[in-house]
Image (spheres, grey):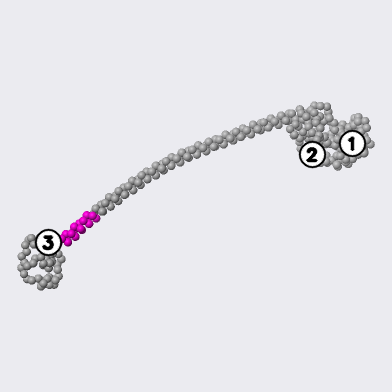
């Protein structure tokens, strides 16, 4: 019998699988197999059985390739695991380094911020101190300036010209000798003044006017002198005089000239008022003004002049438009 027959070998393997506890085969299938196989006794040697049990070259090649791929797969998995581990380790180390760097940077930033804050605080304190010092310096400078101005003002007041009025008088229109007002004659009244200050009175301008009777209604405040140049009154010199004569319009005469045709005679009506102002300047250009207003008061065979605080409701001080004296 040919033991190498493929059909024979297949039948024997089938029997061996049955003996190795493989799943039972359908009885009908076994009956078919029994019908196929001849009812013969077969004596098989152990060597033949080992040969039968041994794998075929194709099976061995398949198993070798399977084992190779299994080992290769295990190696690939091992290599991938090692690669992943090293990647994780590197990444973790980098993260730790970055965290450490961040912590260090944060600490450095905190220190820098604290230093900046301290510097800003110090700068602010210095600025506050500088401001206080500047304020104190300004205050000292203002006090010094005020003191200097006070000294200057005091010096000017001490050294300024100072015109005062010495008195008032009347004279005869024809003889110019002292005389009381006489009915039927023009009235001639004079104001006597002098500079008792320590410096010259510059640009001195004198207003001197006379009104009597119903002409008192013409009493008024004259405008300030602009563009007019006055005289210089030297300090502590002889007395100075300004004279007014009764004329039609007392405001038309501002000086020594006189139009005889304008002169009017006194009719005895009262009151007789002599008024005006004396304005002048010091060497610094400061303007001073001295107003005056007096009323003649007859007394028997003589008479006197009395100061008037107001005439027709106009205060005497208002006769100086500058308001300075």
User: Which of these two is toward me, 57 or 284?
Assistant: 57
CA gap between label 2 and label 1 equals: 23 Å
Between tags 3 and 1, which lies in front?
3
Q: Residue at x 77, y 38 (%)?
A: 322
CB under 8 Å between discs 3 and 1: no
Give the number of the disc on residue 226: 2
Mark 1 surroundings within 10 Å by alpha-carbon count, few (fewer than 14), some (14 through 19), many (20 or more): some
Q: Determine which of the numbered discs, if any, sits on residue 258 in the image.
A: 1
Residue 59 spot, x, y in % from top left: 17, 61
Instruction: Report helix, strand or loop for mark 2.
Output: loop
- Does the residue at mark 2 contact the one at mark 1 (Cβ under 8 Å)? no
Using the numbered discs, state the Cα–Cα distance from disc 3 to disc 2 in whole angstroms: 152 Å
Q: Secondary structure at mark 1?
A: loop
Residue at numbered disc 3: 53
Residue at 49% x, 38% y: name it. Answer: 119
Q: Is 258 or 64 nearer to us in this picture?
A: 64
Q: Does the segment drawn in magenta span residue 57?
A: yes
Location of the N terminus by quadrant is bottom left
The answer to which quarter of the image holds residue 234 is top right
Instruction: Let me know if residue 120 is in the magenta part.
Output: no
Q: Main secondary structure of the magenta part?
A: helix
Q: Which residues are magenta?
A: 56-73
Residue shown at the point (18%, 59%) measured from the top left: 61
């Amino acid at each position: 019998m040919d033991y190498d027959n493929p059909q024979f070998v297949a039948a024997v393997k089938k029997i061996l699988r049955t003996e190795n506890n493989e799943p039972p085969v359908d009885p009908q299938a076994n009956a078919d197999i029994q019908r196929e196989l001849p009812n013969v006794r077969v004596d098989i040697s152990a060597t033949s059985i080992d040969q039968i049990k041994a794998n075929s070259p194709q099976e061995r090649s398949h198993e070798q390739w399977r084992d190779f791929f299994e080992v290769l797969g295990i190696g690939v998995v091992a290599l991938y695991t090692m690669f992943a581990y090293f990647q994780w380790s590197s990444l973790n180390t980098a993260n730790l380094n970055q965290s450490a760097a961040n912590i260090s940077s944060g600490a450095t930033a905190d220190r820098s911020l604290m230093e900046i804050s301290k510097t800003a605080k110090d700068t602010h304190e210095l600025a506050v101190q500088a401001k206080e010092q500047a304020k104190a310096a300004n205050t000292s400078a203002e006090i010094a300036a005020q003191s200097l101005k006070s000294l200057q003002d005091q010096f000017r007041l001490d050294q300024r010209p100072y015109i005062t009025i010495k008195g008032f008088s009347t004279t005869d229109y024809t003889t110019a000798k002292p005389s009381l007002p006489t009915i039927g004659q023009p009235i001639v009244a004079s104001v006597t003044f002098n500079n008792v200050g320590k410096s010259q009175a510059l640009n001195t301008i004198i207003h001197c006017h006379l009104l009597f009777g119903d002409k008192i209604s013409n009493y008024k405040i004259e405008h300030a002198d602009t563009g007019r140049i006055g005289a210089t009154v030297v300090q502590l010199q002889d007395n100075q005089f300004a004279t007014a004569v009764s004329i039609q319009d007392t405001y038309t005469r501002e000086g020594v000239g006189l139009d005889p045709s304008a002169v009017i005679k006194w009719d005895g009506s009262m009151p007789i008022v002599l008024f005006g102002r004396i304005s002048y300047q010091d060497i610094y250009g400061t303007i001073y003004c001295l107003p005056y207003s007096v009323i003649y008061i007859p007394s028997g065979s003589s008479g006197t002049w009395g100061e008037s605080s107001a005439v027709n409701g106009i205060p005497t001080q208002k006769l100086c438009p500058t308001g300075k004296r």
